[in-house]
Image (cartoon, rainbow, N blue to C red):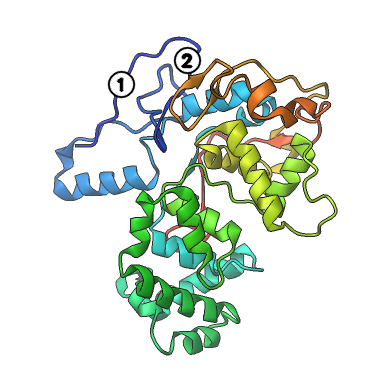
Amino acid sequence: MVHEEEEEEEEGSHTKATGQELQPRGRDAGGSLHPEAPTMEASGGTDSFEAQQILHDYFQLDVGLARLYQAWGAVDPHFQKVAASFPGVRVLRQDPVECLFSFLCTSNNHLVRITGMIERLCRAFGHRLCQLDAEPYHAFPSLQALAGADTERRLRALGFGYRAKFVSQSAQAVLRQFGAEGLHQLRSTPYPEARRLLCALPGVGAKVADCVCLMALDKAEAVPVDTHVWQIARRDYGLELGSGARCVTMRVHSELGDFFRQLWGPYAGWAQAVLFCADLKMFRQNPSTSVRTKGGPARCRPTPALEAGGQDSASPGATGTLCTEAAPALCALTGKCHRGASRKQLGGGKCCTGPSPQGAGH
């Protein structure tokens, strides 16, 4: 039985970390906007219980969002403004193989084309699951299927272009280096090492590696950085890293990731997902759901920040007060924390980042 622990929480306390994993478990009282999973009981039979377990794991319902949102908002005024309109944003726990090869399709691509490519990939290499309303459905291909001798040729015929080589060669490299279950083993590998191993695969850069680490390998501290995240950092946090560059360099990626990890703590990747959703064009261009922030100087609060070591850090000897210790750049923003773009409301629903089971998107 999967059961969420209930624990009493003193007013003003924050989520603590234990090793690599925070413990923000337990249900939120008072009708929270961040609903937690109910206790699962096998009353519907074995199949029903197994399905509940799969969904519980896929949506990572053991992660208590309310306390994470509270902790992030306490140290980041900009996040607090944005988060009110975007409750319940969860990072999916993808299958590592599916996640990696889905993201290999995203290079220089757009969502509609990515989705079509992944659907063709499943039809060509995945086994057939069922047929519904005359439409066949296929599983995501196995590593063995993608590592075949003629995979690259077949993918090029399906319109994958140069990505065909990356899919084929990466599948072969994973099998050769890790075996059929190798990527799953990276869930227990420390984040820096898992990221390094992924970046060694053909076609995998820093952003794709961090996406896979965050969305499939349980590395909640991984912060994928693309041009959108770079713009958020410059516009809303006053960071001028790589201001003369036209694209995200490795240095920019590394420094932005470190900045947000210092600011948000060991679940920084989840906090970034909230801001990423808020910055999507579909929300920014809908004035009926906008929530505008007011101008004014940014003020960092002397609130304990989350740290990976597992303590609420109120003393300078640990992480200390965010304003003076963990992220001093935030205190020099001269108003940019509260300035600028309007934020859009999700409409009370949930949003999940990462490729969906049969494609990229929600």
| Pick the front one: 306 or 3 | 306
25 on left or right of 345: left
Is any part of residue 212 visible from this angle? no
358 on left or right of 239: left
Instruction: Using the numbered discs, state the Cα–Cα distance from disc 2 to disc 1 in whole angstroms.
Output: 15 Å
- Mark 1: which amino acid? Glu
Furthest-top residue in this view: 11
Q: Nearer the viewer, mark 2 or mark 1?
A: 2
Q: Residue at x 75, y 36 (%)?
A: 236
User: Which residue matches tag 2?
Assistant: 13
Measured as percent of width and height from the top left, residue 71 is found at 54, 24
Is any part of residue 183 visible from this angle? yes
Q: Of callouts 2 and 1, which one flags the residue occurring earlier in the amino acid sequence?
A: 1
- Mark 2: which amino acid? Ser
Measured as percent of width and height from the top left, residue 239 is found at 77, 40
Q: Secondary structure at mark 1?
A: loop
